[in-house]
Structures are given as structure tokens and as C-alpha cells.
């Protein structure tokens, strides 16, 4: 049986200040811009429509995407696309907008597609690009969905709510435009949350059982860039160099995890994010130290490598891994982040009532299989419980 690996990213990636102007060079007739009211109010929608107009492309705007977009929003956007028949779809905004746009793209091209089918890893999404190509323009330096095979959609029809996601190279955008002008509008708290998400992407990619010689150096470099530049972007949102470095770090982390998948930090974060409305990056930041502790028996040397990329040496892998955890804690203190699920405001009785289902959903999450240590449901419950109370896993 073959064990070959691949490395896939969008065909075209444009980055750096002023890269939005790349839109002027596009070929197409009609575009639907999938976004939210924030991007409208900041003026980016009008700017993009202007650039598309210079390219001779008529544009229409769907701006009803909410945080953690649900299935109903995706279907509504797909109906909007069926009405306007675009040959270009532009996801503009944070991960919610870009992921919602990916979901709408599927149902635009296949109106009769079934939810359960599209979430089957790698085979569930049918061949796209029959009607349209996809362009992703991120406004945050975090999710990296502009270069990935994932689209996360929340199912609010079940309890606890779940986040389901595609794992299909079909939804990898055709073009990613990463202009630091957009994330420069983020306030400090969102800068910290999304920036920590980058660190988690790089970390989970590096320790993933699917890691490779191609992804390792990019993951390490991305992680080290976050450690250097995120505190600067958090302290001064107008620091253009910090903003650009963080946007590039996010892009690079996306290169890695879309080709390695992630781990149980994301599996568990998806659950507390969906059920308790904890922002995704913050949920990851809460869970990561506890997941690292759980993974220490099999991945200490890999975590020590990341600490070494931060410039922190150690005599043993365990020492290096624990210094990496110390770095995470110190970084969270800088950003005034909660250290536990309880500190994030989640009621203990409600959490414990949902614990079995949260663990079950995390085990079924597509991010779980590549985790370096193969967990049981009891393992997941222990990680959740320790993360809730803020106590060590090991």
C-alpha cells in the first residue's frame, strides 16, 4: 500500500501591501462577494467592487454571514448565487465569510447536494469549477482558510451544536489575495485570538502524524514569526511590519496544516466554540497547553523543536516541551486570555452535563486522526476536564 504524501495550495497566491489591486487583472463577467456587515462598514466591499469594475466584472454582494456561519446561511447564499449566476465567487472577511462562501459554492454548483455527503473526508465534495472559480481575501491573520481544503459550518439543529467541516481539495480557493491592509483594522483582542490560531495551526501541523519534510520548516518558521511579531501587532495595530509578518505567518501555517491536518486541540476547540460561543482562536488558545501535556509521551521532541525555533534551548525533549508550554502561558498572559474554560465564563454544571457529548463529538471530529497520540473518549474527557479547571493533564 502506497504511503505517498502531497502538497497542495491555491494556484495563485498574491500577498503584501496593495495586493488587493490584483483584482483589476481578473477575467470574468459576474462576481458574488460573500462577506459581512463589518467589511461593508470598513469600506472594503466598495473598494473591491471598484477594482472589479475596472476589470469589467459586474458584482453583487451577499453580506449576511454571521460568526460561525450555519447551514441556513449557506443555503441562503447559494440561492443568491443561483439568482445572479456568477463565474467568480469572492470570500471576503474572516474565516467565517470565506468558509461560508466555500459552502455556498458547493450548493450553487450542486443545489441538491446533501450535508452528510459533503462532510465525508476527501470524497464528499463533488467536482467544482463547473460554474465558478473561488477567490479568498482574508481580513484576519488567523484561520488561513484562504489556502486550505476546509470549510467549517456550524450545525445549530443539534445539541450540543457542532462544527462540521469539509476535507476536500475541491474547496481550496483558486486565488488567495492576502493584503495586510485588511487585518490592520482588527482590534487587539481579535488580533490576539486570530494570531494564537496561527500558532496552533503551525504547532499541530508540526507534531501531526502527517508531517513531512516539506511542511516541517514552514511550520517552524511560521511559529517563530508568531512569537516574534504577534505581541508587536497586539501592542500597536498600526505597526505595518508586524501586520505584514503576521499575515504572512498565517498564510504559511495554512500551507502546512492543509497538507498535514491538525489534532485534538482543534477537535476540542471546535466543540467548546460551537456550544459556548467562544471565538475559535481563543478556544484553541485555551486548549493548547493541555493538549501539549497530553501529547508529551509521544511528541516531546517535536514540541522542543518549536521552543528551539523560539530561541529556547533545553537539555532534554521533556524539558524543551515544558518550556514550550511556559511560552504559551506567558503569551496568553500578555493578551489577558483566560487560562481555562471556566475562566472563559462557561458554567460548570452545564459543561459537565455536556461533557460526554462534547468528547464524543471531538472524537468524531476530522482533526482527531492525525493527532500524534491516539486518544480514547476517556482521554478526551480528561483533557476537557483539566482544561475546564485549569489543572495539569500529566
Image: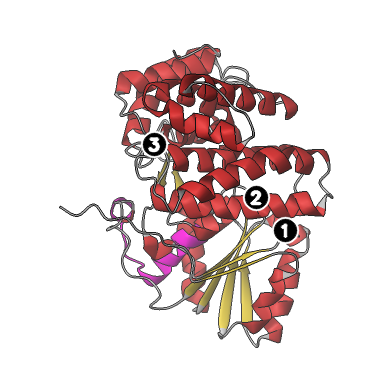
**Can you give x and y, in whole percent of width and height, for residue 365 in the image?**
36, 38
**Can you give x and y, in whole percent of width and height, for residue 32 in the image?**
57, 72
Contact check, label 2 and label 1, Cβ < 8 Å: yes
User: Residue 158, which numbered label?
Assistant: 3
In the rendered structure, which disc, 2 or 3, sits on the residue that comes first in sequence?
Answer: 2
In the rendered structure, which disc, 2 or 1, sits on the residue that comes first in sequence?
Answer: 2
Query: Which one is nearer the viewer's eye here, 255 or 388?
Result: 255
Left or right relative to 313: residue 383? left
Query: Which one is nearer the viewer's eye here, 255 or 301?
Result: 301
Q: Is 333 rendered above or below residue 89?
A: above
**Can you give x and y, in whole percent of width and height, for residue 76 in the image?**
49, 60
Q: Is residue 47 visible?
A: yes
Instruction: Characterize the local packing of mark 3: few (<14), some (14-19) or many (20 or more) Cα atoms within 10 angstroms.
Output: few
Residue drawn 37% across the image and 32% down it = 362
Q: Quadrant of the C terminus?
A: top left
| Residue on which disc 2 sits | 141
2 or 3: mark nearer the eye: 2
- Magenta segment: 100-117
In the rendered structure, which disc, 3 or 1, sits on the residue that comes first in sequence?
Answer: 3
Task: Determine if the magenta segment contains residue 110.
Answer: yes
Label 3 residue SS: loop
| Residue on which disc 1 sits | 180
Q: Residue furthest left?
A: 1
* Inter-mark Cα distance, 3 to 1: 37 Å
Left or right relative to 114: residue 251? right
Label 2 residue SS: loop
Instruction: Classify residue 355 by image quadrant.
Output: top left
**Can you give x and y, in whole percent of width and height, for residue 342 in the image?**
58, 17
Query: Which one is nearer the viewer's eye here, 6 or 392?
Result: 6
Q: Is 278 rendered above or below residue 197?
A: above
Main SS of residues in magenta: helix
Amino acid at each position: 500500500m502506497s504511503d505517498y504524501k502531497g502538497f497542495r495550495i491555491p494556484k495563485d497566491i498574491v500577498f503584501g501591501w496593495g495586493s488587493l489591486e490584483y483584482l483589476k487583472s481578473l477575467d470574468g463577467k459576474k462576481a458574488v462577494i460573500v462577506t459581512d456587515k463589518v467589511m461593508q462598514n470598513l469600506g472594503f466591499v466598495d473598494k473591491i467592487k471598484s477594482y472589479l469594475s475596472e476589470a469589467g466584472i459586474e458584482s453583487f454582494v451577499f453580506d449576511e454571514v454571521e460568526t460561525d456561519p450555519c447551514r441556513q446561511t449557506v443555503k441562503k447564499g447559494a440561492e443568491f448565487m443561483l439568482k445572479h449566476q456568477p463565474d467568480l465567487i469572492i470570500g471576503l472577511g474572516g474565516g467565517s465569510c470565506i468558509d461560508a462562501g466555500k459552502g455556498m459554492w458547493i450548493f450553487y454548483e450542486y443545489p441538491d447536494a446533501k450535508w452528510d455527503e459533503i462532510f465525508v473526508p476527501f470524497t464528499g465534495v463533488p467536482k467544482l469549477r463547473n460554474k465558478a472559480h473561488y477567490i479568498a481575501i482574508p481580513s484576519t491573520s488567523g484561520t488561513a482558510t484562504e489556502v486550505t481544503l476546509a470549510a467549517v459550518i456550524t450545525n445549530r439543529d443539534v445539541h450540543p451544536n457542532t462544527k462540521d467541516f469539509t476535507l476536500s481539495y475541491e474547496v481550496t480557493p483558486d486565488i488567495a489575495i492576502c493584503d495586510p491592509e485588511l487585518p490592520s483594522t482588527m482590534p487587539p483582542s481579535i488580533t490576539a485570538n486570530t494570531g494564537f490560531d496561527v500558532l496552533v495551526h503551525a504547532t499541530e501541523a508540526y507534531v501531526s502524524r502527517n508531517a513531512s519534510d516539506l511542511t516541517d520548516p514552514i511550520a517552524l518558521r511560521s511559529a517563530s514569526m508568531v512569537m516574534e511579531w504577534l505581541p508587536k501587532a497586539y501592542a500597536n495595530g498600526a505597526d505595518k511590519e508586524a501586520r505584514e509578518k503576521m499575515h504572512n505567518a498565517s498564510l504559511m501555517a495554512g500551507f502546512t496544516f492543509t497538507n498535514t491536518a491538525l489534532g485534538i486541540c482543534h477537535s476540542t476547540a471546535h466543540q467548546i466554540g460551537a456550544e459556548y460561543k467562544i471565538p475559535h482562536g481563543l478556544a484553541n488558545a485555551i486548549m493548547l497547553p493541555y493538549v501539549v501535556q497530553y501529547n508529551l509521551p509521544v511528541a516531546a521532541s517535536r514540541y522542543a523543536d518549536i521552543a528551539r525555533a523560539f530561541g529556547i534551548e533545553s537539555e532534554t525533549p521533556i524539558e524543551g516541551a515544558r518550556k514550550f508550554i511556559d511560552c504559551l502561558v506567558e503569551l496568553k498572559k500578555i493578551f489577558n486570555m483566560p487560562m481555562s474554560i471556566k475562566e472563559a465564563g462557561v458554567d460548570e454544571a452545564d459543561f459537565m452535563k455536556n461533557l460526554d457529548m462534547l468528547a464524543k463529538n471531538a472524537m468524531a471530529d476530522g482533526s482527531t486522526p492525525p493527532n500524534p497520540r491516539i486518544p480514547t473518549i476517556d482521554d478526551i474527557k480528561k483533557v476537557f476536564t483539566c482544561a475546564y479547571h485549569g489543572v495539569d493533564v500529566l
